[in-house]
Image (cartoon, coloured by chain):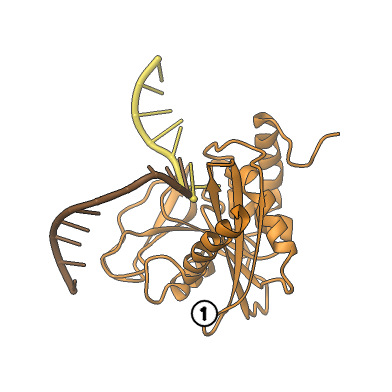
Chain colours: A orange, B yellow, C brown
DNA sequence: GCGACAG
DNA sequence: ATCTTGTCGC
């Protein structure tokens, strides 16, 4: 039988075009965030496995309150623009192992700053029906001006006349990050949240903690 | 055809 | 993503 994630490249693209229309760029009314999650995926080339880790932080203290992980064989190759079809299966499994769902999720990669406006963060947000933000270390698409040198400086990420996200400097003098709304959040709120989540380093604490935990998890899933 | 190209 | 040493700067 045909598995939900067993798609051809063309079918994946068609699904993105279809689902992009379901994405919401509006922050919910009475948006109260207590738990913020960070997601990261590692690849073990030795046995061709993906390891996903989800960490949940207290939105006020930024302390880790829960973690979960999952592992599986990649069911899709890495193709720029079709990233989510490779990474999401183990990520979703990790989320299922969480005791409490977070109020906001920060992903490594893009949200709507994507050729079809449906990056990893948008895909995950739609599947979990939860607000998501995409925060990438590098750009996938879009043009922008270099933001100012100070923390908090931003510039628009533009594509075909549309604002698809922001280029954000999270610390004085560091390389900027690329922020875009994933689902159920506005571009502006997405940017504000990333800045708030990155009080000390270039990357938000959600990403840093997820990165740290995915490495511990890989050791476990290997041995 | 050529260059770009999240992790 | 991952493979990898030293090096510059605070």
Q: Quadrant of the N terminus of chain A?
A: top right
**Residue, disc 1:** A62
The answer to whether B4 appears left or right of A86 in the picture is: left
Q: Position of residue A32 (x, y in %)?
A: 64, 80
Q: Quadrant of the C terminus of chain A?
A: bottom right
Residue A68: quarter of image: bottom right
Residue at the far bottom: name it.
Answer: A61
Question: How many residues crowd around disc 1 within 10 Å: few (fewer than 14), some, or many (20 or more)?
Answer: some
Q: Position of residue A87 (x, y in %)?
A: 61, 48
Return the residue nearer the eye: A91 or A192: A91
Q: Is residue A52 visible?
A: yes
Residue at the far right: name it.
Answer: A1
Residue at 75%, 62% (x, y): give it: A96
The answer to whether A160 appears left or right of A154 in the picture is: right
Residue at 59%, 53% (x, y): give it: A222
Return the residue nearer the eye: A84 or A45: A45
Return the residue nearer the eye: A42 or A137: A42
The answer to whether A95 appears left or right of A144 in the picture is: right
Badge 1 element: loop
Q: Chain of mark 1?
A: A
Residue A74: quarter of image: top right
The answer to whether A10 appears left or right of A142 in the picture is: right
Residue at 56%, 56% (x, y): give it: A218
Q: Position of residue A183 (x, y in %)?
A: 64, 59
Q: Position of residue A201 (x, y in %)?
A: 37, 70
């Amino acid at each position: 039988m045909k598995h939900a994630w067993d798609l051809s490249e063309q079918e994946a693209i068609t699904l993105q075009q279809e689902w992009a229309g379901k994405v919401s760029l509006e922050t919910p009314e009475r948006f109260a965030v207590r738990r913020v999650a960070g997601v990261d995926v590692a690849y073990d080339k030795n046995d061709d496995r993906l390891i996903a880790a989800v960490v949940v932080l207290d939105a006020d203290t930024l302390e880790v309150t829960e973690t979960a992980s999952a592992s599986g064989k990649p069911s899709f190759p890495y193709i720029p623009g079709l990233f989510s079809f490779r990474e999401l299966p183990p990520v979703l499994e990790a989320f299922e192992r969480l005791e409490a769902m977070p109020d906001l999720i920060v992903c490594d990669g893009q949200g709507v700053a994507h050729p079809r406006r449906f990056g990893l963060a948008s895909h995950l947000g739609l599947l979990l029906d939860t607000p998501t933000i995409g925060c990438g270390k590098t750009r996938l698409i879009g043009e922008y001006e270099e933001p100012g040198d100070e923390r908090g400086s931003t510039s628009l990420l533009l594509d075909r006349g549309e604002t698809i996200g922001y280029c954000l400097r999270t610390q004085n003098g560091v390389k900027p990050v690329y922020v875009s709304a994933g689902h159920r959040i506005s571009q502006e709120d997405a940017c504000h949240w990333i800045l708030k989540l990155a009080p000390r380093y270039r990357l938000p604490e959600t990403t840093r903690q997820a990165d740290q935990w995915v490495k511990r998890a890989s050791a476990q899933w290997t041995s």
